[in-house]
Amino acid sequence: LSHYSKRTVDILYKYPTLGFDELEGIANRTDYDLRQHQEHSKEDLTYLDPETNERYLPYAIEPAAGVDRIMITALLDAYDEEEVRGETRVVLRFHRDLAPVQVAVMPLSKKDELIAPAREVQALLRPHFRVEYDQTGGNIGRRYRRQDEIGTPFCVTVDFDTLNDAAVTIRERDSMEQERVPIAGLLERLRARFD
């Protein structure tokens, strides 16, 4: 306990490998800081309570938390592994608002006829979400898994059917369920998923 603190409380987090350890400390510093300033500055730093007409030096409460610990706990809480068809699937289950990438737009292949509509979908969504465009090619399942690993809640796939029906497939990270949606209703559908 520090000499200036009347009481200190630690907020603990249960780390997977360390067990319970400090996440944040909160100290009741009493009027120590203002009293020190008042003594050295010779200024009256008391507060006048308008209801009681009493003067007093306010207490200071000092929370001490580092962004590094908060970030590591967010990552630890989001990290998940599950078995899917005999393989380990790694998923960062970030809350949709915390996900660095909220929507990934993917043409099914690198063929030119899919690139243009995929870029249009990207342009439609970019003003409203944090969007990544992924035309790396290869197996769409592997691209979905890559997005799962970085915590992307939704993937939007532009495929050859899109050229005929002007619809895309939304794939949800946590359930892996897929839904076919007209491009005209895509923004509204995704917004509803974020509410």
Image: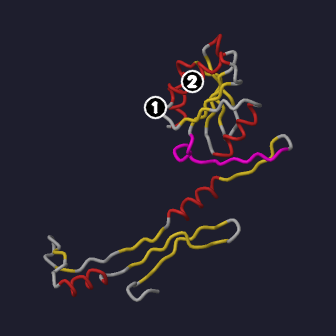
- In the drawing, what numbered circle is on residue 27? none
Q: Nearer the viewer, residue 42 or 48?
A: 42
x and y percentages locating residue 178 in the rendered image: 68, 29
Judged from the image, the secondary structure of the residue bearing numbered disc 2 is: helix
Q: Using the image, determine if residue 165 lies above or below residue 50.
A: above
**Residue situated furthest right in the rendering:** 86
Crowd tier of the residue under label 1, counting other residues whose Cα lies within 10 Å: few below 14, some 14–19, many 20 or above: few
Residue type, mark 1 in image = Pro
Judged from the image, the secondary structure of the residue bearing numbered disc 1 is: loop
> Is 99 one of the magenta-colored residues?
yes
Image side of residue 64 versus residue 101, left or right: left
- In the drawing, what numbered circle is on residue 127? 1
Q: Earlier in the sequence, mark 1 or mark 2?
A: 2
Q: Main secondary structure of the magenta part?
A: loop
Q: Nearer the viewer, residue 10 or 128?
A: 128
Magenta segment, which residues?
87-101
Image side of residue 176 versus residue 46, left or right: right
The quadrant in which residue 103 appears is top right
- In the drawing, what numbered circle is on residue 119? 2
x and y percentages locating residue 57 in the rendered image: 23, 80
The quadrant in which residue 174 appears is top right
Q: Nearer the viewer, residue 55 or 146?
A: 146
Seen at 44% across and 86% down, the residue is 2
